[in-house]
Amino acid sequence: MLWLSFAPVADTITQHFFLSMDQVNWLSLIYLLVSIPFGMAAIWVLDSVGLRGATILGAWLNLAGSMLRALPSMAVGIPNPFFFFMSGQSLCALAQTLVVFSPAKLAALWFPEQQRATANMIGTMSNPLGILVANVLSPALVKKAEDIPIMLGVYIAPAALACLLATACLWENVPPVPPSVGAASSTSEDFSHGLKLLIKNKAYVILAVCFGGGIGAFTSFSALLEQILCASGYSNEFSGLCGALFIVFGILGALILGLYVDRTKHFTEATKIGLSLTSMTFVAFALVSQLQGQTLALAAICSLLGLFGFSVAPVAMELAVECSFPVGEGSSAGLIFILGQAEGVLIMLLLMALTVKRTGSSFSTCGHGEDPLDWTVSLLVLASLCALFTCVMVLFFHTPYRRLEAESLGHPVPRTCAVEPEIMSPTPKSLLQSPGLPLPAGPLQEVPGPVSAPQEPPEHAENVTRAV
């Protein structure tokens, strides 16, 4: 939520604090830059310290960052507000690395095999849900420059609530009984050795590069959406609506796809088809977004981008764990996210570098006082990159599902089980061979029919019952 809280009202921020549009873009871009060097530390914390410690640390960092960036609008006489904005966003970016890597590990440790994809979907979609709130809440709160302090103060409340819940309500890293064999052997590889295994895993490298490129494309799209649409005459409110549709349909698609993959285990097929449909939708957005008056078409395209693109994210994270097992879930999912952030930095800088001043008549509604930009070449390059990543993924990615194969060989042993179950013999034993019964001294006689069979004494019958 805090990541893109400035982007939907970028023009108002520039006017009120006398910042350039590049400085406002850096408030979003810093998330990507921070996650690259500190992401490796976050992976180590997640796999070594555990879910509880990582979540609590992330919640406190997020709260500190949200309060720090609100200082310029609440205190008088601060000479450099950009420094406080950037410092606060940096702390929030550190928190994000600890939280975004967690869903795959949470699903693996706490949920059985038939529920993991759905659990991962719910955890992964919490981040886009925050982006949705930011896209809707920021334009709704900021109608004029004087509303910015209210917006920054409002964003402190959910950070404080999350901090309180994480500190007071989280008590365990893992459940008392592992729900699956994969959970029992989670993080079975040493951290450094696990990273080496990931780098040597061809299927994982292809998935990391291609899906990481998709993460970078979606990151750039989310951060630059308002600037792209205002250059073609669309309002901030419409940009916020497109961002909201993007997230809502993404969550809906992720729910449907997560349930489907939990039943069928078609991780690879779902990922490839989703990326292919996303690439075609990006081409449509690159063409239609440069036209005026296409509100319905743009709203539909943004909805399809979320439906096809965002829905693939939790499935791809599960696929990363499957193809890299027994490497820890934090390492396999986190490394993809770090690579995606690095690719996002490069893509975002490339898109901004390819923009030129728009010539001729302008319908721009951008209010930051600068000449409107032409995003045509940038968006065509973005669509081309998405198509390239998709082609490589479809043609060259093949992998067995290592975790499912390992789980098919055995069942988890409950940690609370103290007695092993007795293995029953396929041949039933005679009652006289049962433990606890004395054998008769004489030779065995043929037993007459049931009608003439002698009745056993009550004491002997009681002994037989207890032995059985």
Image: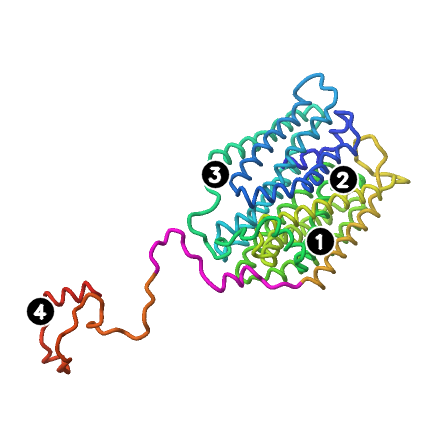
Label 4 sits on residue: 457
Looking at the picture, tell me which residue is in the foreground, 179 or 12.
Answer: 179
User: Which marked residue is nearer to the observer: mark 2 or mark 4?
Assistant: 4
Q: Secondary structure at mark 4?
A: loop
Depicted 154 relative to depicted 308: above or below: above
Label 1 sits on residue: 209
Q: Residue furthest right?
A: 360
Label 3 sits on residue: 170
**Upstream in sequence: badge 2 or badge 4:** 2
Q: Secondary structure at mark 2?
A: loop
Label 2 sits on residue: 234
Indicate the quadrant containing the N terminus: top left, top right, bottom left or bottom right.
Answer: top right
Depicted 96 relative to depicted 332: above or below: above
**Upstream in sequence: badge 2 or badge 1:** 1
| Inter-mark Cα distance, 4 to 3 | 61 Å
Give percent across and percent down for residue 231. 81, 39
| Inter-mark Cα distance, 2 to 3 | 44 Å
Give percent across and percent down for residue 188. 53, 53
Q: Is residue 429 visible?
A: yes
